[in-house]
Amino acid sequence: MSKTRRGVVLGFVCGAVMAFAGTSPALAQAGLDLSDGPTVQASKAPDSFSGLAKRLMPAVVNISTSQTVATGLPTFPEGSEIERFNPFFGRPDDDGFRRQGALGSGFVISADGLIVTNNHVIQAADEIEAVFSDGRTLRATLIGRDSDTDLAVLKVESDAPLPFVSFADSDRAEVGDWVMAIGNPFGFGGSVSAGIISALERDIQSGRYDNFIQTDAAINRGNSGGPLFTLSGEVLGVNTAIISPTGGSVGIGFSIPANLARQITDQIVEFGAPRRGWLGVNVQPASDEIAEAYGVPGRMGVLLTQIIEDGPADEAGLEVGDMLLTIDGREIDGVRSLTRIVADTEIGKTVTIALIREKKRTDARVKLGELEREEDEEARDELPDGGLANNSVGLQTGAIDDAARRRYNITSDIRGALVLSVSPRGPSFGQIRKGDVIVEVGFEDVANARAFKERVEAAETQPNTPLLMHVIRDGRSVFVSIMLDT
């Protein structure tokens, strides 16, 4: 995009893998837990990060991916006078296809070769390789991934145990703590940066489980999937996104907390995909006025606006208008809080929910179900850019499946393109929301995500012209006008 807007940039870089100087090969073959070793005194600024970086570097890898993509460009016939021009059209392998590569970062979490990275680093990849600090390159296979939290787990095979690192307890992190990032920014493998935790529990509007650690340690394209370390050498977070008007680090980076990464990673290893609890409700936050009307001090709790038929809440007798306050003693301070608590709770567990109904406090016992997994991303009719969209409207869209209809209260008669994510750096930020259904673009019907893509591409041929979109949001029509980034 030509315009520079405040936004989240996923650390994802295309190019060739760059091997880098490594540490002792003996250490790289030892299968040691590199989190267990000398630490830096956390009570004062460290004189140097060199010892910590040297110890941890063997467990951090560069992730190199490649995939076959359509060039959309002509391939001149073999033997023709103009065949020599084929290299200028992307060197297609055959039939108008070519190989495309990308780079990211990751880290080893077990001696037998399990590696954690971001989902957007490996999404749609045909081949994945992990490049270690001693120069070794190992083919990686995908164990599983989770687009909601942007995490993926890979596996490499090695003749000897691999050095690895462990997750920290991210709940103990505090603003101002020192942290260190190691990764592969812009293809420069083994790059180290340091800083502090700037904030906790950040919501950057990239998904319903947003709970990021913010840091001022330099994170750039290619750092995605790499570790954010504590001074004790444990992984505090998985570096995932930055906010930047330029695309480079300006000191505002975001990492997935270790406790969430550990939970998702464990489930992927055990089940091949994460499993999350499900309450079967739609809710809205409780404003000060609503809280006062219910007799609740402060802005606490969420209000039930819909009960899914035959869902856990329905079977437990919850009612529209109930205000939920706590689940098993854990306070609900907003919609995101409820989502995280339910998702984190064991499937099938019976929880006690404290609520207010008609100004009277009561408890309900609810047996949580399992959130239905959405269809595989490859099977969806959606735009092929993962995570936060980077197209001229800044939107990622997909098909409306049954799970989406339940989650976003979309009636069966609605057809269109479901908004999966909105990039804060795109022109739709602040006007389009995740869960909206785009049914018209430029006064033309949109039946699905592919049709939406075609409408946007057509609009891109008319620069400086506002694009009118008809959106269904919570059952209501909303019209927005977007000026495309071209």
Image: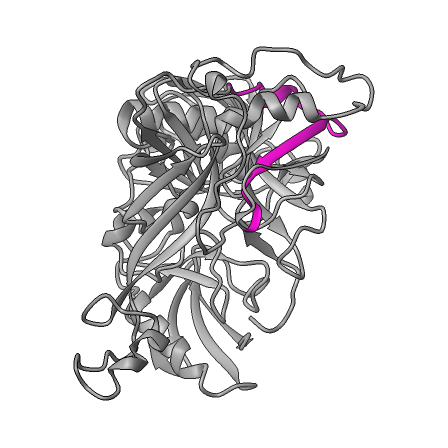
Nearest to the observer: residue 304 or residue 348: 348
Nearest to the observer: residue 255 or residue 447: 255
Above or below: residue 142 compared with residue 375:
above
**Quadrant of the rendered structure where residue 170 is?**
top right
Pinpoint residue 24: horizontal percent, then vertical percent: 52, 21
Above or below: residue 392 compared with residue 365:
below
Nearest to the observer: residue 44 or residue 324: 44
Regarding residue 113, the answer to whether it shows in the image is: yes
Bounds of the magenta segment: 166-186
Left or right, residue 368 beside residue 470: left
Regarding residue 446, the answer to whether it shows in the image is: no
- Residue 57 lies in the magenta-colored region: no
Placement of the N terminus among the 4 image quadrants: bottom right
Pinpoint residue 140: horizontal percent, then vertical percent: 32, 35
Above or below: residue 247 compared with residue 266:
below
Above or below: residue 250 compared with residue 182:
below
Nearest to the observer: residue 431 or residue 294: 431
